[in-house]
């Protein structure tokens, strides 16, 4: 039985990309196909795909979800919005020297106050004095991941969003999508590769470590997703013409596989708590484009389930030895789904 230790590896700190490359498509691309590795590049992605294939991309947009301020007592607080709840409420992580109590107020960014309405697990329900998303976007800061050590800059405002981001709601970028620009999308279209959207709003829980040694004891955070009827139709048409479904990012894969858990891919909106570990039976996705993931993370478990545990271990060792760049601003993999023989 696999445990948390099976998904650990040593990553030299200098492999963690702190800044994006000058061009989105300049990143390297490590292709894993049934145990075989190929060093390629993102700009060559069209050569790895075939006419009739379908790329499915997450069109979520990152909120300015990090806000700093003070409690009424004067103590410093940091708020990281987990998800807007509609209207004037949101769930958030709150870092403070002492946990804030229900009914207390937090003064944020010298601009407005929120009321602590209550605790929900590790998160707090906060009441805003107006539309929560509007206030977050106006006064908040871009929430770069904890392993990126510089404050968000004007360059990050552009590069930590995908060029096709549309629907505000995430606190982290779907990073596989960061490698695409208008030129690459045009090349893919000219090759006969189609594109379809999904939406999954990435929550702050994506950076939470797995603490349970026994993976069966881990519980995923919930994330809102929406799968359009047009995308379901595009996937059906792709299947009919013999094409392959390529998920751009683990968030896209989780959306599609969540929507197919009942045995049929169904359009609609819902909540995903899908925890993909080796042995999971994939129903929709044939190829996965994804960045390199943190040790002992649910995302590393997901790609191991998709491409094979030993195959992913070998690929990560190769990537480290070959100086690939890791995590959000790093390089990417294109993983062919490993089918049982």
Image (cartoon, rainbow, N blue to C red):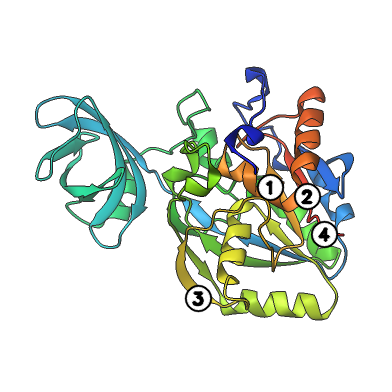
| Residue located 57% across and 49% down the image | 174
Residue under numbered circle 1: 303
What crowding class fits label 1: few (fewer than 14 Cα within 10 Å), some (14-19), or many (20 or more)?
Answer: many
Residue 237 appears in the figure? yes
* Nearer to the camera, 131 or 75: 75
Residues under numbered marks 2 and 1 in contact, where contact means CB atoms less than 8 Å apart? yes
Q: Is residue 263 above or below residue 60?
A: below
Quickly name the residue at label 4.
340
SS category of the residue bearing label 1: helix
Pointer 3 with pointer 1, Cβ within 8 A = no
Mark 1 vs mark 4, CA separation in Å:
16 Å
Residue 187 position by quadrant? bottom right
Q: Nearer the viewer, mark 1 or mark 4?
A: 4
Residue under circle 2?
335
- Is tag 2's residue or tag 4's residue first in the polypeptide sequence? 2
The residue furthest front is: 1
- CA–CA distance between discs 2 and 1? 8 Å
Q: From where the camera sits, is residue 183 visible?
A: no
């Amino acid at each position: 039985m696999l445990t948390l230790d099976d998904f650990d590896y040593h990553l030299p700190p200098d492999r963690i990309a702190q800044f994006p490359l000058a061009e989105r498509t300049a990143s390297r691309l490590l292709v894993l196909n049934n145990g075989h590795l190929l060093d390629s590049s993102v700009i060559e992605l069209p050569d790895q795909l075939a006419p009739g294939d379908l790329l499915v991309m997450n069109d979520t947009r990152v909120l300015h979800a990090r806000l700093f301020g003070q409690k009424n007592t004067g103590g410093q607080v940091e708020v990281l919005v987990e998800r807007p709840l509609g209207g004037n409420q949101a769930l958030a992580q709150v870092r403070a020297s002492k946990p804030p109590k229900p009914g207390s107020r937090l003064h944020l960014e010298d601009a407005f106050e929120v009321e602590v309405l209550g605790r929900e697990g590790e998160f707090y329900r906060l009441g805003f004095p107006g539309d929560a998303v509007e206030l977050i976007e106006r006064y908040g800061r871009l929430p770069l991941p904890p392993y990126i050590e510089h404050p968000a800059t004007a360059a990050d405002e552009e590069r930590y969003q995908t060029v096709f981001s549309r629907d505000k709601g995430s606190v982290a970028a779907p990073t596989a999508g960061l490698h695409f620009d208008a030129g690459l999308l045009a090349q893919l279209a000219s090759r006969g590769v189609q594109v379809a959207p999904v939406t999954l709003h990435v929550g702050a829980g994506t950076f939470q470590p797995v603490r349970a040694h026994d993976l069966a004891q881990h519980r995923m955070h919930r994330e809102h997703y929406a799968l359009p009827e047009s995308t379901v139709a595009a996937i059906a048409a792709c299947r009919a013409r013999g094409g392959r479904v390529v998920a751009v990012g683990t968030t896209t894969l989780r959306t599609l596989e969540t929507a197919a858990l009942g045995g049929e891919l169904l359009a609609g909106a819902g909540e995903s708590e899908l925890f993909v570990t080796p042995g999971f039976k994939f129903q929709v996705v044939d190829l996965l484009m994804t960045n390199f993931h943190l040790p002992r993370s649910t995302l590393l478990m997901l790609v191991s389930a998709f491409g094979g545990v030993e195959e992913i271990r070998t690929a990560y060792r190769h990537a480290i030895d070959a100086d690939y760049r890791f995590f959000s601003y790093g390089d990417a993999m294109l993983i062919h789904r490993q089918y049982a023989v």
